[in-house]
Amino acid sequence: MNRIFFSRYNFFISSFISCLALGTLASCNKVELPFDDDSIDDDPNIAVYTNYPVTLSTYKVDSFATTGDSVFTVGHHTDPEFGTIHAGSYAELQIPVNGVYDQNVTFDSLVLMLNPNGNYYGDTLVPFQMSVHRLQENIENEEEGNNSFYNLRRFSFDPVPLGQTTITIRPNAGKVVKIRLSTALGQDLLNKLQENDDTIQNQAMFNRYLKGLCLRSDSVSSKALYYFRSDSTGLVRLHYTLKGAIPQDKYIDFPFNTDKQFNSILYHHNGTNLAAFATGKTAVKTSELTGHKAYLNSNMGSYIKISFPTLLSLKETHPYIKVLKAEVLIKPDPATYKYPYRLPAALYMYITDDENRPTSILTDATGQQPQTGSLIVDHLYGQNTQYSFDVTSFIQTVLAEGQFSKSALMLQPPSGFTDASIDRLIIDDQTLNDHVQLKMYVLGL
């Protein structure tokens, strides 16, 4: 048995915990603990549960907001564990600064520009197809002033694209993706600016003329989702030539309205363990109902809930026990994060109430920063790759609360449910292996 080192300090924990069962999986052995007090090493009352029963669940929300990130998520991917996901982005353009009124200019091109932000979900070696479409309805909710748009929301668009491209994207190469748009639209925009047309006098009138854009990808050639950012000056650039003794190449940028930009992320779990969930409904399913696995996916609204329901039985049997240290270890199966998938670099553990709402977060030894799981990667075999969380304070609180405790732990990425990046994790439950463990050092058994 490996020696396990712990901090002397306890801190509040926040996470979401599902159900646990005490059973034959728990083992109790005498261990040597590296506390400052050397006498503890020889204390016969200190024992360790090396694999206390843990219950895993998957918590899925019905939908989540994708407004305000200023990220354009576009693509299509089929994940063998999670199912099919398709993402498209919507944006409302704003009136630009008019620098061509009554000028002698000629149209050159109209181009949409995006910068990959480095994140992706799927196979980046396959060429990616993306098209830009003109919206047929304005981006707005029924309630006036409500600018929250959710991942399941969609707006109608003209099926004939304004422009499209097929390229190979290198997410971290820093190369701008450019899509040339309709010459007719570009010329018309330039004419309206040159004439200072009523259409460009206020945003409401401009929105009636050009309701917005939809960026999407096909489901045949595209095998990945990509995440883009637009330059702060504009999403669409109109290139023109200013006539004169020496012609000058110039451009006008059309910014987008950050309150009216969001991503539609749709998914289907058909043929996977997650088919146990009904679409559009928030629910919690124990791992028994999802193939003895628990699933985290920030783009699909799912987190992993961890619970230890038999702790109270332990307290009933041994009323005076004291948990000195407790640690949760999570060892993902190497087969679940082979290319094109990656493990989250950091994870947060939240304490939740009986309605799965976070109440606090597990912090590090300083008490100021959240624990991030301290990911260790075994690059050779993968068997020793693991996250670890100090849950001492949480376990002590649950035992102190007794039968009135409603607390649980929830594992989630720092970004939460998001359309701006992807965090993906799959954990086997204890019926399959020991990839999730609760280790407890106990006094008084």
Image (cartoon, grey):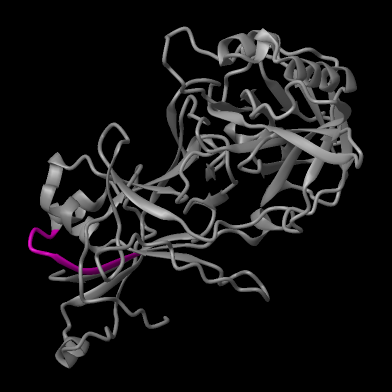
Residue most toward the bottom?
A: 38
Q: Quadrant of residue 408?
A: top left
Q: Quadrant of residue 185?
A: top right
Quadrant where the C terminus lies? bottom left
Q: In percent of the image, x 82 and y 14: which residue is there?
A: 159
Which sits in the foreground, 214 or 233? Answer: 233
Give above or below for 184 relative to 6.
above
Q: Quadrant of residue 107?
A: top right
Which sits in the foreground, 55 or 214? Answer: 214
Residue 326: say if magenta.
Answer: yes
Which sits in the foreground, 433 or 386? Answer: 386
Residue 139 x/y as whole percent = 58, 16
Residue 137 can be seen in this image: no
Residue 48: say if magenta.
Answer: no
Quadrant where the N terminus lies? bottom left
Q: Is residue 305 left or right of residue 344?
A: left
Q: In percent of the image, x 67 and y 73: which residue is there?
A: 381
Residue 366 x/y as whole percent = 26, 70
Q: In percent of the image, x 74 and y 37: which residue is there?
A: 78
Residue 215 can be seen in this image: yes
* Total numbered labels: 0
Image: magenta residue range: 318-327
Instruction: Examine the residues drawn in magenta and state their main secondary structure.
Output: strand
